[in-house]
Amino acid sequence: MGTTMRLALGGVVLGGGDGQVEDDHAGEPTTRGTVVEVERFERFRAKFPFPLDDFQVEAIGAIEADQSVIVSAPTGSGKTLVAEYAIQCALETGRRIAYTTPLKALSNQKFNDFTRAYGADKVGILTGDVKVNPQAQVLVMTTEILRNALFGSGLDDLGYIVLDECHYMGDEGRGTVWEEIIVGAPKDVLLVGLSATVANVKEIADWISIVHRPIVPIYHPDRPVPLHYSIADLAGDIHDIGEVRKGRAHVVGDETRGQDDRGRWYTRRVVDPTVLIEALDARGWLPAIYFIFSRAGCERAMQDVLADGRPLITREQRREVDAIIGEAVAESPSIGESTLSQAVFQGLRIGVATHHAGILPGLKRLIETLFERGLCRVVFATETMSLGIHMPARAVVLQGVTKRTDRGFRSLTHNELTQMAGRAGRRGIDPEGQCVIALDARDGLEDLLRVVDGAPEPIESQFKLGYGSVALLLGTGAPPELLRKRIESSFGQYQNLKRIREMEAEVRALEDALERAR
């Protein structure tokens, strides 16, 4: 794979294995490199009914040049296609590939997708709950499982590691695991990082190049489907965010709770979901994912819609839903045993559901299947659904811009907002995606607009070498010096040293200026 390769598609030429894109002045597609590389690329490209984007071709060129790659691009832009190319390389070269995700649900979905694509004999899965075909060439797992494997005996014949949702490295609770994998991965293994849009992908790549091996950073900020933001007030009226910015829209709820100009009093702090869903339906903005930042809130919203009773699907669609539910229960009777499951079944029969970590995996798959088929029109979901689970929608609703964390309430970051909003807009179906933010009276318009208008935040290291990691390392017989080396190799240490050098340079500049002033 180390042979230099040039590919030209639609006037874009990749060359030199440096991950750079240059113009094809000759105007004719050209391919150079080994016959195997060129044929592999052509076979891969032929599987898709659409031309590959430039950033995808650039990433593929890096992989064929035996380089690691990290891709930072918006949700739904096609980053997974890059990982699929790495899978094809692994299968054709006899190497193994570990595909990691931060969630069991996402791992299960990828396992099912890859099993359909490559065959059950080629694909396995390892999570805390499931172990299937662990010697497979394509092994899907949660990030913690791979970290534990790397700290132990490793994985035989490992050639590639895919870090899906790589921006999770900035997660306060679990980000350490991503750093431990990058630092602990064998140097002959190619890394393929897939990240949402972040501000410092170049900085991350510079660090990885030091602690692991050279890696090509690819930044693609453009969405395949444009995204439009709106604000829903307490009355359920939807306002274009541009009009709100200009002060041309009267947003009910942007004042102390009280009477509006239509003589109504609003005691809710956020719009009734039944009212907002009706408004979305009237605009043709369904199907929608409705994000609420608690399980209880998701379940209450579904109960509100059930109490309202207005169906979002036709009678014919309801019969189809009933048949699919019946098949799912016959296959896995346990998914229908709980009170919550029965409530979800009732919701599905009118076109709504709830999706969160408390829902059984089999029931989640049922909800996802019905949503993908257009038989479930609204899903009330917690934030975890924004992490890669394939459920594209016409619109996304966010109930406020404040969420609860272990340290209390805080505003969403811009990255968190765009991760959820990115689920809106189906490629090849919708001319644009719709993100509707339901104003929470406790937030206020200023807070809401600040989150929407913010710039992508950089990933900050959350590295903390916990007791579990120390125990895993010491259990392998590793010397204590290795613990020190792991800490010194962390992204946090890299960022700290970089800041120290910047401050030292600033001090020297000030000292020079002071000396000249004398």
Image (cartoon, rainbow, N blue to C red):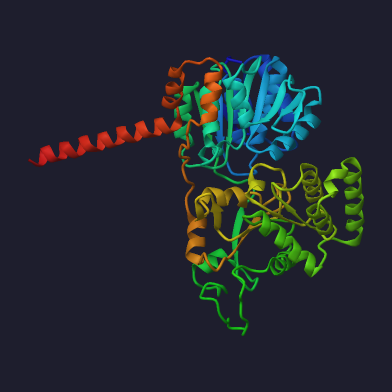
| Number of numbered markers | 0
Q: Is residue 398 above or below residue 142?
A: below
* Place of residue 98 in the rendered image (x, y in percent of width and height, measured from the top left): 66, 25
Between 477 and 485, the one lying in front of the other is: 477
Q: Residue furthest left?
A: 518
Looking at this view, name the residue that lies furthest to the bottom: 263
Q: Is residue 362 visible?
A: yes
Q: Residue at x 46, y 38 (%)?
A: 200
Quarter assignment of residue 203: top left
Residue 102, quarter of picture: top right
The C terminus - image quarter:
top left
Residue at (16, 36) in percent of width and height: 512
Q: Is residue 82 left or right of residue 402?
A: right
Q: Is residue 289 above or below residue 260?
A: above
In the rendered structure, the answer to whether residue 281 lies left or right of residue 401 reads right
Q: Position of residue 486 (x, y in %)?
A: 46, 24
- Vertical comparison of 413 with 209: above or below: below
